[in-house]
């Protein structure tokens, strides 16, 4: 494929991406929260035969990223508080092109429309109701949010189950761009719905890979005695996540925080309330802060806020004295829990959304991200030059840099053979500086292991002791095309671009895309077992001849006779040949066209690093 065709293909494939220069963002091709919770058993026993009216859901009390089994029959959507923009109350259900295991419904084809997620209610008893009771189903929906807009050919659809077993489509909307949440009112009038097994179900049609077709759903109500004009919500609720108590980082080591707590602490804590009603309300607010272990009270505060109708308002709380806590172990892990609450005057409003909690972590890493990703970030490289992404950090007391934790975002096709290097810079050539690399590790490959925190850890072979001062972590992608567009998970809700720089055409440039990369330098003591290291098959091996015509041999050091399996992959990660081999045994590659390939061997537990093979 010519260079012109490659460029055309790239931009047609990523038509919905936001791009400034060589920086791009893209949809996530996985959902870590769902992967982590997919095998947890749901409690579906001892449920009533059918639920009774009224039915209400605002996804505030859902656990483990899935809808509550008290109200929902399936678990395909992602319940979260990061994908929605200005939701009605905290928590939304997000529909996308990923299944309940958090991976694409189609893992091979990049541009494929599928009937993707569904959200189905448990049975609801309407047998004592009739159309005269004016039963309405209402809900709020939002395309895109912090994700990506559904294409015009994509849609969100609502179905209702009739007594004859037929699911009837009663509402649908095509893909759209970012907008405030919209409320929909659906009358339940067909006599076929009035039985003891009534259900409703949303389904989205999604084009995977182009946009992932994100939809957010919130504040679902089904009840009798309503009307088409019954759109008022008399409810005051917390919405987006509260801010960190730190003014820049989302997490940092206690050892560094204690050097000068006042310089790291924000002047206020902020939580956001929304008055969904039609009248202004004066509410009392407050917070309580404590260390989880050892249990230690840190502070509290109270106040009042006047909330205009149908508006969001940030509530600022005076910062408590977080520096008053004296850690028993300066290198230990500590979690500060900050609980915010309000008391409003609306009668019979839901109470679960009147409280929200923020957990502030102090551990052995620095982070600008909050641990969740809504998008992915990548560089579009020049064919003849490497690309580098560098993120600025600092040591506030001398410490040992032991490695990095990074979350690479999955891609379709797989990016597991996209080579990169890690570099630690003391300075880079911006604002009068010069590039000063003090450590690097080469020939690395992205890993996507299902670790506890879903970060792959690259522990340095030679930990680096750094004195106080700024340093940069760089991800270097080599030129040549095979490592182009390596996706790194991006937290779209946090500001981190002010610490990020990139180099594609020879000069460093400040990042113009907001959000924080899920990239964390690990400092201090040993790497914790809660985040697994990247395991590679520990064997010294090579290929000969290379370049090759028809046959190659795997040469394993020390004449080990152990059998290994092998895979030969093209530059897109597709397996073309595979089988079993031993030391110095021939592998027939005569069927492969001329070009570049990668070869990996496996001992049954882990793969080696791939080696490049040139086929003549």
Image (cartoon, rainbow, N blue to C red):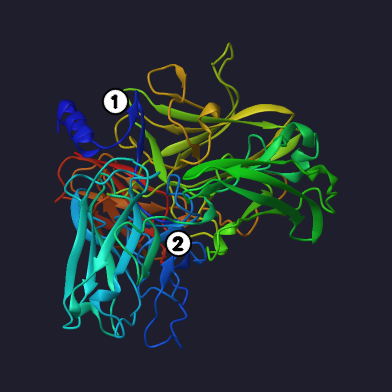
**Is residue 333 among what the camera can see?**
no
CB atoms at circles 1 and 2 under 8 Å apart?
no
Helix, strand or loop status at disc 2: loop
Does 81 appear above or below 504?
A: below
From the top left corner, tell me how far across and down residue 258 is, in percent: 80, 40
Q: Nearer the viewer, residue 554 or 374?
A: 374
Above or below 33: residue 272: above
Residue at point 47%, 64% (across, down): 36
Nearer to me, 300 or 117: 300
Indicate the position of residue 432 as horizontal and vertical percent values: 58, 11
**In the displayed structure image, the side of residue 162 where residue 541 appears, left or right:** right
**Residue 81: horizontal and vertical position, in percent?**
49, 53
> Circle 1 sits on which residue?
383
Figure quadrant of the N terminus: top left
The structure residue drawn at horizontal position 44% and vertical position 85%, both measured from the top left corner, is 47
Q: Residues within 10 Å of mark 2 (few under 14, many from 20)?
A: many
Residue 463 visible in the displayed image: yes
Q: Which of the image's four quarters has the C terminus?
A: top left
Tell which circle, 1 or 2, labels the residue nearer the N-terminal end. 2
Name the spot of residue 11 as percent of width and height, x first. Answer: 22, 32
What is the CA distance from the residue labelled 1 to the residue labelled 2? 49 Å
* Side (left or right) of 361 relative to 543: right
Q: Judging from the image, what secondary structure is the residue with disc 1 in?
A: loop
Count of numbered circles on the image: 2
**Rendered image quadrant of residue 55:** bottom left
Residue at the spot of label 2: 58
Return the residue nearer the eye: 458 or 354. 354
Question: On the rendered structure, is 13 left or right of 609?
Answer: left
- The residue depicted at 46 percent of the width and 40 percent of the height is 492
| Residue mark closest to the camera, 1 vs 2 | 2
**453 vs 213, nearest the viewer:** 213
* Residue at image location 46% in from the left, 47% down from the top: 373
């Amino acid at each position: 494929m010519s260079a012109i065709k490659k460029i055309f293909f790239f931009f047609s494939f990523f038509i919905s991406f936001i791009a400034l220069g060589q920086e791009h963002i893209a949809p996530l091709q996985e959902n870590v929260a769902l992967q982590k919770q997919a095998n947890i058993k749901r409690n579906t026993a001892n449920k009533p035969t059918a639920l009774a009216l009224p039915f209400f859901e605002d996804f505030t009390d859902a656990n483990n990223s899935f809808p509550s089994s008290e109200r929902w029959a399936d678990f395909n959507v992602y319940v979260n508080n990061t994908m929605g923009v200005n939701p009605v109350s905290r928590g939304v259900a997000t529909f996308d092109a990923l299944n309940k295991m958090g991976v694409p419904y189609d893992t091979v084809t990049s541009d494929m429309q599928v009937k993707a997620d569904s959200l189905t209610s448990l049975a609801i008893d309407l047998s004592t109701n009739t159309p005269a009771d004016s039963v309405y189903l209402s809900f709020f929906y939002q395309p895109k949010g912090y994700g990506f807009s559904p294409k015009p050919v994509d849609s969100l659809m609502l179905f209702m189950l009739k007594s004859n077993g037929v699911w009837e489509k009663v509402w649908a909307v095509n893909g759209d761009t970012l907008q405030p949440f919209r409320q929909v009112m659906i009358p339940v009038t067909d006599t076929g719905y009035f039985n003891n097994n009534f259900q409703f179900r949303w389904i989205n049609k999604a084009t995977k890979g182009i946009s992932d077709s994100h939809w957010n759903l919130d504040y679902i109500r089904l009840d009798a005695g309503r009307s088409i004009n019954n759109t008022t919500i008399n409810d005051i609720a917390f919405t987006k996540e509260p801010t960190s108590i730190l003014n820049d980082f989302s997490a940092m080591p206690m050892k560094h925080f204690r050097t000068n707590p006042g310089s790291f602490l924000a002047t206020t804590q902020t939580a956001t309330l929304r008055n969904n009603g039609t009248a202004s309300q004066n509410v009392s607010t407050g917070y309580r802060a404590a260390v989880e272990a050892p249990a230690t009270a840190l502070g509290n505060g109270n106040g009042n806020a006047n909330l205009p109708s149908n508006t969001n308002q940030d509530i600022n709380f005076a910062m408590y004295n977080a520096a008053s806590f004296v850690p028993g172990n300066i290198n230990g892990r500590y979690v500060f829990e900050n609980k915010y609450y309000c008391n409003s005057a609306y009668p019979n409003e839901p109470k679960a959304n009147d409280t929200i909690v923020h957990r502030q972590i102090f551990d052995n890493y620095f982070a600008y991200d909050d641990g969740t990703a809504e998008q992915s970030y990548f560089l579009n490289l020049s064919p003849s030059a490497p690309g580098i992404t560098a993120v600025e950090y600092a040591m506030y007391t001398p410490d040992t840099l032991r490695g990095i934790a990074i979350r690479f975002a999955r891609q379709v096709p797989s990016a597991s053979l996209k080579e990169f290097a890690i570099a630690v810079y003391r300075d880079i050539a911006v604002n009068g500086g010069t590039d000063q690399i003090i450590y690097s590790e080469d020939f690395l490959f992205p890993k996507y292991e299902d670790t506890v925190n879903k970060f792959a850890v690259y522990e340095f072979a030679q930990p680096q002791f750094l004195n106080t001062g700024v340093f940069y972590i760089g991800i270097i992608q080599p030129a040549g095309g095979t490592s182009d567009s390596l996706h790194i998970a991006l937290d779209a809700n946090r500001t981190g671009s002010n610490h990020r720089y990139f180099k594609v055409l020879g000069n460093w440039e400040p990042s113009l895309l907001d959000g924080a990369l899920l990239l964390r330098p690990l400092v201090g003591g040993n790497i914790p077992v809660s985040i697994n290291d990247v395991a590679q098959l520990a064997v010294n091996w090579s290929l000969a001849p290379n370049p090759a015509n028809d046959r190659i041999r795997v040469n394993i050091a020390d004449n080990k006779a152990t059998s290994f399996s092998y895979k030969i992959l093209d530059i897109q990660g597709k397996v073309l040949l595979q089988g079993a081999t031993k030391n110095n045994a021939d592998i027939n590659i005569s069927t492969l066209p001329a070009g570049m390939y990668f070869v990996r061997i496996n001992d049954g537990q882990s793969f080696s690093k791939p080696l490049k093979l040139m086929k003549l």
